[in-house]
Image (cartoon, rainbow, N blue to C red):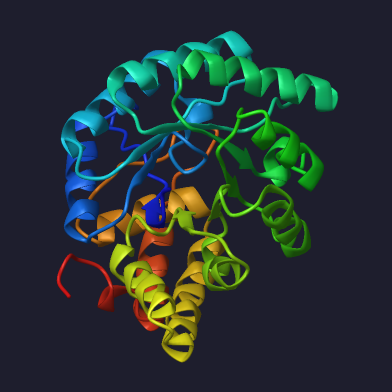
């Protein structure tokens, strides 16, 4: 079972809006040096839905080769069309991924039966890799229920869940109905500690990219029983998150990576890059809340 701190990896893009594999390897090296517990590719943070199928394959192959088995790699393979998701699932398995994850079908309202069919098909295409349900209802307009989670889990279709929702009551119902074998991760960075208290096994998050040391210490403090220490670290993370959120999470996190010394380029349209004036303002605001105390790989 996976656990701990798993960054939802950014996808670096170059000036021509192409996947920058050199910068991608530098980002992976930065995160591994900070002792993360795994990597999650091509999700919301990785702009996966905005990448072509070929680009997603490139990201998957590059990262898995760079990681070389040192930590587990989860590949998000969600797509609007089931055949695309199935092809990406098969590719992830062939490339050496540890697991796949997917958002549920979006845009068309396919109902519970359609969602179950989708996960059965991508699970089959993954050829035995663990499959994680990526629950992000603000983006998909579909929310995982305890009943659906239990149905998919009992059938062996899903083995885990990335839960990006603030509904802690349903989260706890999912954990209780499925039992301790369901591998559950927190999605909202600002809620990592509350989610840990509610029984998740770790977090998969966006701001883990520039701040792996901060989240590493938060998780370790909680696991050591130091609740006060974990609270202080969550409060520190939240102060930084509030600044980043004011500028747009993905554009600002990519800008923050440049400030951390690991450039990842700009976001892909329709996401809007920050102006130089905005980056200057962001830099000042991040400095005021202690961001620069946590970047880098030193202890």
Question: Can see residue 99?
Answer: yes
Residue at 55 percent across and 38 percent down: it is: 159
* Displayed quadrant of residue 70: top left
Numbered-mark total: 0
Quarter in which the C terminus is drawn: bottom left
Residue at the image point whose x is 48% and y is 77% from the top:
234
Rendered location of residue 150, percent (x, y): 73, 40
Whole-percent x, y for residue 297 in the image: 17, 65
The answer to whether residue 109 is seen in the rendering is no
The answer to which of 3 and 206 lies nearer the viewer is 3
Name the residue rendered at 35%, 69% in the picture: 283
Residue at 74% x, 42% y is: 144
Expressed as whole percent of the image width and height from the top left, the position of residue 158 reads 59, 33
136 left or right of 122? Answer: right
Residue 182, placed above or below residue 220? above
Image-based side of 160 in relation to 142, left or right: left
- Where, by quadrant of the figure, is residue 212 drawn? bottom left
Q: Which of the 4 quarters of the picture holds residue 105?
A: top right
**On the picture, is 260 further left or further right than 158?**
left
Q: Is residue 110 above or below residue 237?
A: above
Q: Nearer the viewer, residue 245 or 196?
A: 196
* Residue 252 position within the rendered picture, expressed as x and y whole percent measured from the top left: 44, 55
Residue lying at the far bottom in this picture: please name it. Answer: 228
């Amino acid at each position: 079972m996976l656990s701990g701190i798993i960054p939802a990896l950014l996808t670096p893009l170059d000036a021509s809006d192409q996947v920058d594999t050199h910068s991608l390897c530098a980002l992976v090296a930065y995160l591994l040096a900070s002792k993360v517990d795994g990597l999650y590719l091509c999700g919301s943070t990785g702009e996966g839905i905005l990448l072509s199928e070929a680009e997603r394959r490139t990201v998957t192959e590059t990262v898995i080769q760079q990681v070389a088995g040192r930590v587990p790699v989860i590949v998000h393979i969600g797509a609007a069309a089931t055949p695309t998701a199935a092809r990406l699932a098969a590719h992830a398995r062939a490339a050496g991924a540890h697991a796949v994850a997917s958002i549920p079908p979006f845009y068309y309202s396919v109902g519970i039966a359609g969602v179950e069919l989708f996960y059965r098909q991508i699970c089959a295409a993954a050829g035995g890799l663990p499959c994680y349900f990526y629950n992000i209802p603000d983006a998909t307009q579909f929310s995982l229920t305890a009943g659906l989670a239990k149905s998919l889990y009992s059938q062996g279709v899903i083995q885990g869940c990335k839960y990006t929702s603030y509904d802690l009551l349903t989260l706890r119902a999912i954990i209780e109905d499925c039992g301790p074998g369901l591998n559950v991760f927190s999605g909202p960075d600002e809620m990592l500690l509350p989610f840990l208290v509610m029984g998740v096994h770790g977090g998969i998050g966006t701001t883990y990219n520039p701040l792996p040391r901060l989240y590493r210490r938060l998780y370790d403090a909680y696991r050591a029983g130091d609740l006060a220490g974990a609270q202080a670290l969550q409060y520190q993370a939240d102060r930084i998150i509030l600044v980043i959120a004011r500028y747009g999470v993905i554009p600002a996190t990519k800008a923050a990576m440049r400030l951390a010394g690991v450039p990842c380029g700009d976001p892909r349209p329709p996401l809007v890059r920050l102006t130089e004036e905005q980056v200057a303002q962001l830099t000042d605001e991040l400095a005021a809340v202690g961001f620069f105390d946590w970047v880098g790989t030193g202890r």
